Amino acid sequence: MAKLAAARYFCSVCGASSASWAGRCPSCGEWGTMEKGATPGAEANRQVARCIVASEALPPSRVSSGFDDFDRVLGGGFVPGGVYLLGGQPGIGKSTLLLQTCGMMAEIVGPVLYLSGEESESQIALRAKRLGTRLDGLHLACTGDIVSALEALPGMRFLVVDSVQAMSVDGEGGWPGSPAQVRAVAQACISSAKERGIPAVLVGHITKEGRIAGPMLLEHMVDAVLTFSGEDYSPYRMLRAGKNRYGSTEELGVFEMTDSGLSPVRDVSGLYWNRASETVPGVAMTVAVEGSLPLIAEIQSLAAATAFPYPKRTGRGVDVNKIQLLSAVLEKRCGVGCSLFDMYVNVAGGLLLREPAADLALCAALASAVRDAPVPADCILLGEVGLAGEVRPVVRLERRLQEAARLGFKRAVVSSRERALRGAAPLAVTGVSTLKDALKAVMI
């Protein structure tokens, strides 16, 4: 007698399995997510996997999205059969970006299919007309049933599903957007895209915590997870990849939202630098790198005398703990009395600095604010600062120096251990070994 399949329970959020039911998933801790399933017998329906030599596998060809910045974030374009999950806040421009992409890809690769469970055909056509999107080759299907919608997929070269939380599969329990429905909709789209070898983009809603709604398993199922973000007060939008099986996750695409839709920003450095003609104490310049994109960053600091024993530290664009740490290094290693002042730090333009290459510029801005001595306007500072007061090298120094020289900077203060000091540089480079020497080099 054939051995019966053992009944097991699976978590609809993380996919963990258990031999018995539990109210709370033992892996991710979510409540009410354990669902009954069955694992097939060891010999049932087993298929022999096809095995080839790795050298026989050919790399896939890329398909351009029509946006150079979009292609760079993807790693060179869409991969046929690749499934991409795009998340972002409501109203940020996800549908606008994808509708413009569909219009351009219809000219590049052929017919595209845009599935919408949230808008009608007339609403999409109205937005496409406002954006100036070509409608030839753009096929629309506005329904909440993903299975019937995917019946129009044969012959298409690109697929967009807006959104995965608005679609449903008959026979699955729960309302559209529930973990079981999201998982089933995503699996149907992934299977169809990979079977036909076409790229597909699934739009995902964002929760109030900032993560994509639905089971965490959704992000594991897709090939890439993209995030489209921006501030309410700013027309600029940032496209990043949090996961990418086909490229880097460090690239950044910057778009500007206009009346006619989204357009790429060519000179991104200009967004975060006001090019002030006068030098002001507390301001220092550095070059940040987002993937392969160098950005000029302006760090602003303000020191206000305080009578309290615990001075305040506030930062926007820089981690407050970093300000605390470097303030202590300045006071201990360089004799800069930061403990007598409340310190306020801001990175102009809303740029967020995470990399340690900005440490030296942050120290210079803090010391300049405390001593009321401006940093030369034509100088940039690049280096990581340690607790001993030493200045360490940074990655991609040559690319940073080239961008600074292109924008008119004349001097750069970097670590004396940088290999770039041994060759020709596009601007005058001063090598320093300690933070104290760096402050002397910029006359603070």
Image: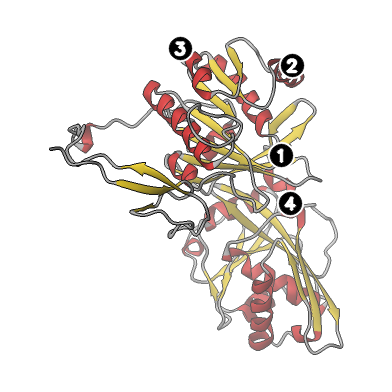
Residue under circle 4? 272
Residue type at the position of mark 4: Tyr
Along the line of sight, the residue nearer the viewer: 268 or 319: 319
Residue 176 sits above or below residue 403 on the image = above
Q: Residue at x 71, y 19 (%)?
A: 128
- In this view, the residue farthest toward the left is 1
Front position among marks 4 and 1: 1
Task: Tell me the CA gap for discs 3 and 2.
Answer: 25 Å
Q: Residue at x 71, y 39 (%)?
A: 90
> Given the image, on which type of amino acid does mark 1 rest?
Pro
> Disc count in the image?
4
Q: Which residue is mark 2?
A: 129
Q: Please say if the residues under marks 1 and 2 sit with CB atoms less than 8 Å apart.
A: no
Name which residue lies at 63% across and 57% down: 287
Residue for badge 1: 90
Residue corresponding to mark 3? 155
Q: Secondary structure at mark 2?
A: helix
Judged by depth in the image, the label closer to the viewer, 1 or 2, is 1
